[in-house]
Image: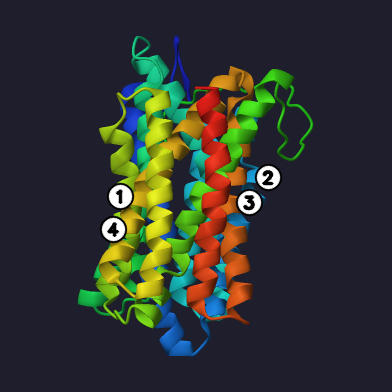
Amino acid sequence: MSTSIYVPSSTRRPFRLRHGAGFWVIAAAFLAVMAFSTIPTPLYALYQARDGFPTWVVTVIFAAYAVGVIASLFLIGHLSDIAGRRRMVLIAVLIEILSAALFLVWNDVAGLIVARTLSGIGVGALTASATAHLSELRAVARPEEGLRLAGTVSTVVNTGGLALGPLIGGAFAQFLPAPLLLPYAVFLVILAVAAVAVALVPETVERAEERPAYRPQRISLPAEARGAFSAAAVAAFAGFAVFGLFTSLAPSVLAGTLHETSHLLAGAVPFAVFAASAVSQIVFVRMSTRGQLILALVLMLLGLSGLAASVLVASLAVFVVSGVLAGAGVGLQFRSAIAVTASIAAPERRGEVLSAIFLIAYIGLALPVLLVGIALIVWPLVPVLVVFVTAIAVLSVPAGLGMLRRA
């Protein structure tokens, strides 16, 4: 792509899409990667039935993905500020292609852990880079528009992709042959097409002639902004802990506690939760930040209370409705957290600070679920889940109120 050819009286440059088209290409690639990252959610039960491992092993496989995200965000997620947005997005998509190939050729427990770790590394390299790239591409294509649409698109494709993955995986498991192979083969092709398209997107970061020395992720904020960042970080942690529950243990809850064994349902429930998160951000986009935060807090508390009740009374309807309410609350809460973070970051540090908020969010995705897995070795699923949702509610309230004070 970067090879130059001498042409008399002119300079030939590699073909690039316009910034407006590039915006939608990055959004589509972001969506594809996030969908691929949750494809295994309804398939864990099939792996478990095939290999005979206990439920806590599912949390270990899932935690491997989250550990990959965290490591990537800490080590390379912020490098798009230096290396360029397009380059980091392309690297992320290529890592996901490698992960998909591993799912096809090495899918015992050890292989699943390695493939999921690689998938997490790709997601960690992508999230902040793509979020910043989208805002910058849109700023060039539509400078009069402001950041609202770019912010909405980035959070919607993030959570919307997370929603589509389980639904697609569940549909493959329910209706098509080779459900532990075919989904990954299909996404291998989709991701390859995405990589080619991303390579044609304009760059939005000017690479310095002298690169600064490498350092891992750090958070550099003015003292007056640290309170706002802390509230946003706790909100992101709590919200992603809810996502972690549904992307790791929802099929086990459905099968073990609610006695529902449909593979399609195992994918449809996480889809409904993530879809509610994406839809709430679209429906309430014109609501004031203060209004969104109040609504997010109410929805989160209602949803979390309902989840605790649903496993105590073994009600599928209550479980699904409560998950949808909690998901809608997480969507609004996370969008507000991203908005707060972006507003307090200097432009030249935006990728770094966004990486920090995603880093904390994905710690929320991994750590609580891993603790749940450890607890399941000793205690039954129902009391562990009740304690889990209670703890998340306790975290969400002060975080929501903290952001509300600064709205």
Given contact means CB atoms under 8 Å apart, are the residues at marks 4 and 2 in contact?
Answer: no
Q: Give me the disc on residue 150.
A: none
The vertical placement of 75 against 292, above or below, is below
Secondary element under disc 2, as helix, strand or loop, is helix
Q: Residues within 10 Å of mark 1 (few under 14, many from 20)?
A: many
Given contact means CB atoms under 8 Å apart, are the residues at marks 4 and 3 in contact?
Answer: no
Which residue is identified by label 3?
70
Q: Quadrant of residue 50?
A: bottom left
| Separation of marks 4 and 3 at Cα, in angstroms | 30 Å
Q: Amino acid at mark 1?
A: Ala
Horizontal side of 297 relative to 176 (left or right) equals right
| Separation of marks 1 and 2 at Cα, in angstroms | 28 Å
Q: Amino acid at mark 4?
A: Val
Which residue is identified by label 1?
275
Secondary element under disc 3, as helix, strand or loop, is helix
Q: Nearer the viewer, mark 4 or mark 1?
A: 4
Answer with mark 1 or mark 2, whichever residue precedes in sequence. Answer: 2
Given contact means CB atoms under 8 Å apart, are the residues at marks 3 and 1 in contact?
Answer: no
The vertical placement of 13 against 218, above or below, is above
Q: Nearer the viewer, mark 4 or mark 2?
A: 4
Q: Amino acid at mark 3?
A: Ile
Residue closest to the eye, 178 or 360: 360
| Separation of marks 4 and 1 at Cα, in angstroms | 13 Å
Given contact means CB atoms under 8 Å apart, are the residues at marks 3 and 2 in contact?
Answer: yes
Q: Position of residue 190 (x, y in %)?
A: 33, 54
Which residue is identified by label 2?
74
Q: Quadrant of residue 351?
A: top right
Which residue is identified by label 4?
321
Secondary element under disc 4, as helix, strand or loop, is helix
- Give the residue displayed 40% in from the left and 39% down from the top: 296
